[in-house]
Image (spheres, rainbow, N blue to C red):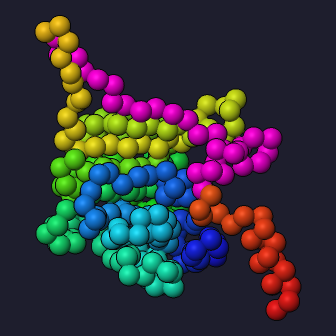
Amino acid sequence: MFQFQQFTIHDDRCAMKVGTDGVLLGAWCEMPPAPSAARALDIGTGSGLIALMLAQRYPHLQVVGVELDADATTQAAENAVASPFAAQVRMKQGDIMTDDWREDDQRFDMIVSNPPYFEETLLSPIQQRAQARHVHHGLTFEALTSRSAQLLKSGGWLQVIIPKTAQPRFVRCAQDAGFSLIRQTDVHTVARKAPKRVMLRFQLHFTLPTHHQNGHTIVGDFLQTDQLILQVNGERSPQYQQLCQDFYLTPAQLNARASADEKT
């Protein structure tokens, strides 16, 4: 169980537990300019963590979480129902790559995913965990990007967190599917070390910003790059704390919970 400020996540029936990657993506990703009835899809929702974070951040957003594993889907649905955001979030079991997986005839404004990414490591003997972690047993980058292009509105955003070493291949797959990379945030555990993760934002059918100068067409800058440092002197960095300030319990809240637990 993991207690956040406004909701609780139970993940004992999920292959992938609540972790830093999911929290980072849920706090970092943004909604593209969209009407008030915006819709988001969380592919491979697991425990429903990212879907609930999106619902908390965007009160007018309708979120669908899709998950292949039956036990995880059931638990994600229970987490959503027990949260203040039950009216915004729906969990569905299914394989998005099959022809019979249909949400409805409407496309999404945004898709988020913390996808399987292990390639060279040995497969877990537990099928549920292998499916959630390994690209050869679960959702490949090619499948995720191509299907996202089919499910998104033109101009919609696909946002993911993956290992930094996997970025070149994921970007190629996304470009082949019609996406352009518009933001990249390198995630460093500490400042002195190379980034282990990267968060990427892609736009479908992106049009390059241009302007004319002296008879020439000038292509404007469109890729935003930055970095996120997670730890400073063994503690969460101010940057990390600010990003997740609406989700992680504060020290005062943790102390209050501990005191309440002692009294019960």
Q: Quadrant of residue 189?
A: top right
Looking at the rendering, the stretch of residues picked out in magenta corresponds to: 216-244
Residue 24 in the image, given as x and y percentages of width and height: 54, 53
Say if residue 84 shows up in the picture: yes
Q: Residue furthest front?
A: 214
Q: Quadrant of residue 69?
A: bottom left
- Does residue 48 belong to the magenta stretch? no
What number of labels is visible? 0
- Does residue 220 belong to the magenta stretch? yes
Q: Is residue 259 left or right of residue 127?
A: right
Q: Who's the residue at 54% across and 78% down the image?
A: 13
Residue 160 in the image, given as x and y percentages of width and height: 41, 49
Q: Who's the residue at 38% across and 81% down the image?
A: 87
Q: Vertical placement of 132 versus 11: above or below?
A: above
Q: Who's the residue at 86% across and 89% down the image?
A: 263
Say if residue 21 shows up in the picture: no
Q: Vertical placement of 226 versus 82: above or below?
A: above
The N terminus sits in image quarter: bottom right
Residues 27 and 104: in front is 27
Q: Who's the residue at 22% across and 47% down the image?
A: 155
Residue 45 in the image, given as x and y percentages of width and height: 42, 67
Residue 181 in the image, given as x and y percentages of width and height: 33, 36
Q: Is residue 259 left or right of residue 66?
A: right
Q: Residue furthest top?
A: 214
Q: Is residue 261 left or right of residue 223?
A: right
Q: Residue furthest bottom?
A: 264
Residues 198 and 208: in front is 208
Q: Quadrant of residue 212?
A: top left
The C terminus sits in image quarter: bottom right
Q: Vertical placement of 184 versus 126: above or below?
A: above
